[in-house]
Amino acid sequence: MSRSLDIDLLRTFVAIAETRTLGRAAARIGRTQAAVSMQVQKLEALLSQPLLNRTGRGVTLTLHGERLLGHARTLLRHHDAAVADITGAGLTGTLRFGCPDDYAAAFLPHILRSFAGRHPQVFVEVVCAPTPRLLAQLGQHALDLALISTTEGERSAAILRREPLVWVGNRHDHAATQEPLQLALSDPDTLDHRAARERLDAAGRPYRVAYASGSISGLLAVVRSGQAIAVLTQAAVPADLQVLPTDARLPPLPTVGLSVRFDLPRPPELVVEFAEHLQRIVPAL
């Protein structure tokens, strides 16, 4: 029997694989969750194999699902490239994009892969840095646009996503109980650094900044060593570290917003297209 893989079914499957929940996948592709569930069932029936494991926290891929994912991404990339080439709808050029370090691992692969599928002739240069450094580069026109973190009360462009700041520690140590509390924080002008110090000062908790750096890999290395705790956005917490519970001695932290900022008041078409892509995909990640 001849079996043909439908592009829409594959696109839905990839969205589920990347977001790990049917609800977020539905939001990304603009369908209802019931429609997404039906598409998965149709794809599983077509291939005569289970593709997803349903859990209380979302979905994971089966062995067959993992194998299909690589094929699906390849097929979608070639399909979208062919459509863009024949119709002339694809954009070309180079885009300079800035992203905060703590969102890079969680968001960038999905953002870049899905945009490349639609516009394979566009080359995206990525700069990962704390928000103050990204704002400086926007002001110097070294970037075309950037995702930036904003405080709850700060006026900015439309907020694409809100993320709580959380205390993060090693799963196997007691760094949060040290006196004074040892902190590994980003640069002093960043939101996590300011929020941590302000909340601890208000709580009267003694602390010491043991490590301060714009490099998130350096911060994570210190936390993994058990020497200090850090402050990250919840989406950026690696699986081997834990979100620490808050209490009177480790007070709750604020929520930050994620928005798009441009270097020009009237950005070119390519920049606008990428910004619209961010608006579609970032809330669903």
Image (spheres, grey):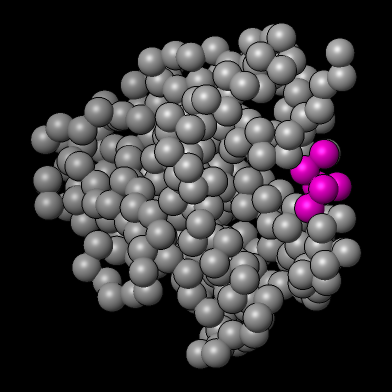
Viewer-nearest residue: 12 or 272: 12
Viewer-nearest residue: 10 or 237: 10
* 76 versus 17 height, above or below: below
* 179 versus 89 height, above or below: above
Residue 90: percent from left, percent from top? 78, 68
Viewer-nearest residue: 236 or 229: 236
Residue under the point 12% across and 46% down: 204
Residue under the point 11% across and 35% down: 248
* 119 versus 39 height, above or below: below
Residue 56 appears in the figure: yes
Residue 143 appears in the figure: no
Residue 234: percent from left, percent from top? 39, 40
Residue 233: percent from left, percent from top? 40, 46
Q: In this image, 143 relative to 106: left or right? A: right
**Quarter of the figure with residue 39:** top right
Quarter of the N terminus within the rendering: top right
Residue under the point 19% across and 51% down: 199
Residue 202: percent from left, percent from top? 12, 52
By secondary structure, the bulk of the magenta-drawn segment is best described as helix
Chain part drawn in magenta: 75-80
